[in-house]
Image: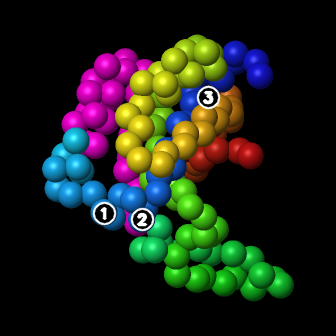
Amino acid sequence: MKDEAARWAILVYGNETFEAQLSAQGWESVFTKHSAFAKKHSSAIIEAERFGWSRDGIAIRGVDGEIVATDGPVVDTDLQLRGIYILEAPNIDTIKTIARDLPYVGPVAVEVRPIVGHERSNVVTPDASRSIHKW
């Protein structure tokens, strides 16, 4: 992988069954650890979001030329997408170092992906109030 990408997504997966059993004190510990992580890496973090329960979402799919919406996640697995960090860093090695500092509570997995062309592909819409991305 080239070191050209300046922005990276860290996708944080967790086990919702495990998380549902956490006490208030357990959740406070998780939030405290993530706050410390965010403070330590504040110069790299552009945005961070925690996702709600996958059962509260909907999946929208194209099936046989029709758009179908179903309750729940796209895929039923042991780990669900629980949050995302968007970071700016010069290369994958820097992101690996940052990702190693994430608080791992319970069954957790992290996926790191480059955000491609975030600067090169922005174009201004006719009303100039927002930008869109070419794919």
Q: Is residue 124 visible?
A: no
- Left or right: residue 95 versus residue 48 is right
- Left or right: residue 132 versus residue 31 is right
Which one is in front, 47 or 40? 40
- Total labels drawn: 3
Separation of residues labelled 1 and 2 (CA atoms): 7 Å
Q: Position of residue 47 (x, y in %)?
A: 40, 37
The residue located at (70%, 16%) in the rendering is 3
Do labels 1 and 3 touch, CB within 8 Å?
Answer: no
Do labels 1 and 2 touch, CB within 8 Å?
Answer: yes
Q: Report crowding for label 2: few under 14, some 14 to 19, many 20 or more residues within 10 A (C-alpha).
A: few
Q: Which residue is mark 2?
A: 17
Q: Report crowding for label 1: few under 14, some 14 to 19, many 20 or more residues within 10 A (C-alpha).
A: few
The residue located at (52%, 76%) in the rendering is 72
Which one is in front, 132 or 126? 132
Tell me the kind of residue under disc 3.
Glu
**Label 3 SS:** loop
Tell me the kind of residue under disc 2.
Thr
Q: Nearer the viewer, mark 1 or mark 3?
A: 1
**Label 2 SS:** helix
Separation of residues labelled 1 and 3 (CA atoms): 42 Å
Q: Which residue is mark 1?
A: 21
Do labels 3 and 2 touch, CB within 8 Å?
Answer: no
Q: Is residue 36 magenta?
A: yes
Tell me the kind of residue under disc 1.
Gln
Q: Position of residue 30 (x, y in %)?
A: 28, 43
Q: Which mark is residue 119?
A: 3
The residue located at (42%, 31%) in the rendering is 102
Magenta region: which residues? Answer: 30-53
Which one is in front, 23 or 94? 23
